[in-house]
Amino acid sequence: MKKNDYSVLNEGELLDKRKSLKEELFKLNQQRFGGRVEKPHMFSLIRKDIARINTMLGKKGKK
């Protein structure tokens, strides 16, 4: 998702989205150590999405 997509979500939705992304990243890490990652490019995309969500949560917390 893009930055603008996250800006329309409220804090609860952002927290839910971050939780689901962390679970997906955990599953990918399990596949990595199992030796069978189908989509290795997803690691960086998920980490970037989590960082975007954390940034949006920080901005909403300051307001």
Image (cartoon, grey):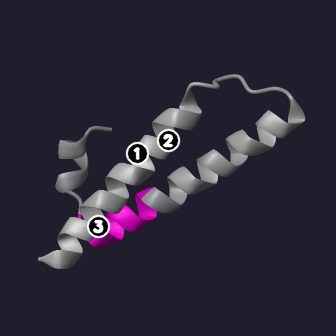
SS for callout 2: helix
Residue of label 1: 49
In the rendered image, the residue lying farthest to the left is: 63
In the drawing, does residue 31 fall left or right of residue 34? left
In the rendered image, the residue lying farthest to the bottom is: 62
The answer to whether marks 3 and 2 mark residues whose Cβ atoms lie closer than 8 Å is no
Residue 59 in which image quadrant: bottom left
- The one of 14 and 60 positioned closer to us in this rendering: 60
Span colored in magenta: 10-17
Q: Position of residue 49 (x, y in %)?
A: 40, 45
Q: Earlier in the sequence, mark 3 or mark 1?
A: 1
SS for callout 3: helix
Q: Earlier in the sequence, mark 3 or mark 2?
A: 2
What's the residue type where badge 2 is placed? Ile
In the drawing, does residue 25 fall left or right of residue 49? right
Residue of label 2: 46
The answer to whether marks 1 and 2 mark residues whose Cβ atoms lie closer than 8 Å is yes
The answer to whether marks 3 and 1 mark residues whose Cβ atoms lie closer than 8 Å is no
Residue of label 3: 57
In the drawing, does residue 39 fall left or right of residue 51? right
Which residue is pictured at 29% across the width and 70% down the height?
Answer: 11
> Label 3 vs label 2: CA separation?
16 Å
Residue 4 in which image quadrant: top left
Which residue is pictured at 34% across the width and 71% down the height?
Answer: 12
Count neighbours of disc 3 (C-alpha within 10 A) and say few if under 14, some if 14 to 19, many if 20 or more: some
